[in-house]
Image (tube, rainbow, N blue to C red):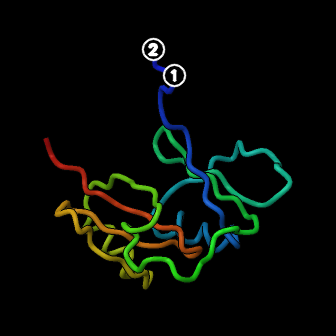
Amino acid sequence: MPKLVTGFHHASLIVADTTRALDFYRGVLGLTIDRSRPDLGYPGAWLNLGDQQIHLLELPNPDPLRGRPAHGGLDRHLAFWVETLDDLVTALDAAGIGYTLSRSGRRALFCRDPDQNALEFIQQTKA
């Protein structure tokens, strides 16, 4: 069978307020906005993450925000590489954002964005 899927382009996250979400994704995580996003009829933003993107969609959220697991590893989540977890911990602490460490034994942590989307950050190992 031929290889039908060749890569990962973007993941979309529903947010209640694009400006508030950008405070987190740009202000805390340091991502940049892709200005090529067309007018889609609703607010949002495309964020660059290497060759991939995160698309923020300011739309009504069909998912419950309450009752989500405290540890994001027990919820659907996006996972990202980081060069050093210590720098991320410093940024999260400065922003007052809580997190939990990975239970896998890897150098990783989980946190939630302002809209309760779970995010995992894994430190890249030096080869």
In the picture provided, is 1 more to the left or to the right than 89?
Answer: right
Q: Residues within 10 Å of mark 2 (few under 14, many from 20)?
A: few
Q: Amino acid at mark 2?
A: Met
On-image quarter of the C terminus: top left
Q: Are marks 2 and 1 in contact (CB under 8 Å)?
A: yes
Closer to the camera in the image, 68 or 34: 68
Q: Residues within 10 Å of mark 1 (few under 14, many from 20)?
A: few
From the image, state whether disc 2 or disc 1 is nearer to you. Answer: 2
Q: Residue at x 24, y 50 (%)?
A: 124
Q: Residue at x 46, y 19 (%)?
A: 3
Q: Secondary structure at mark 1?
A: loop
Picture layout, residue 51 above or below residue 107 = above
Picture layout, residue 67 above or below residue 84 = below
Q: Residue 110's spot in the image, x, y percent?
A: 36, 69
Name which quarter of the figure residue 1 lies in.
top left
Numbered mark located on residue 87 in the image: none
Q: Residue at x 49, y 37 (%)?
A: 8
User: In the orientation shown, which residue stands out farthest toward the top?
Assistant: 2
Picture layout, residue 122 above or below residue 68 = above
Q: Residue 26's spot in the image, x, y percent?
A: 54, 63
Q: Residue 19's spot in the image, x, y percent?
A: 68, 70
List the residue tagged with mark 2: 1
Q: Amino acid at mark 1?
A: Leu
User: In the orientation shown, which residue stands out farthest toward the left?
Assistant: 127
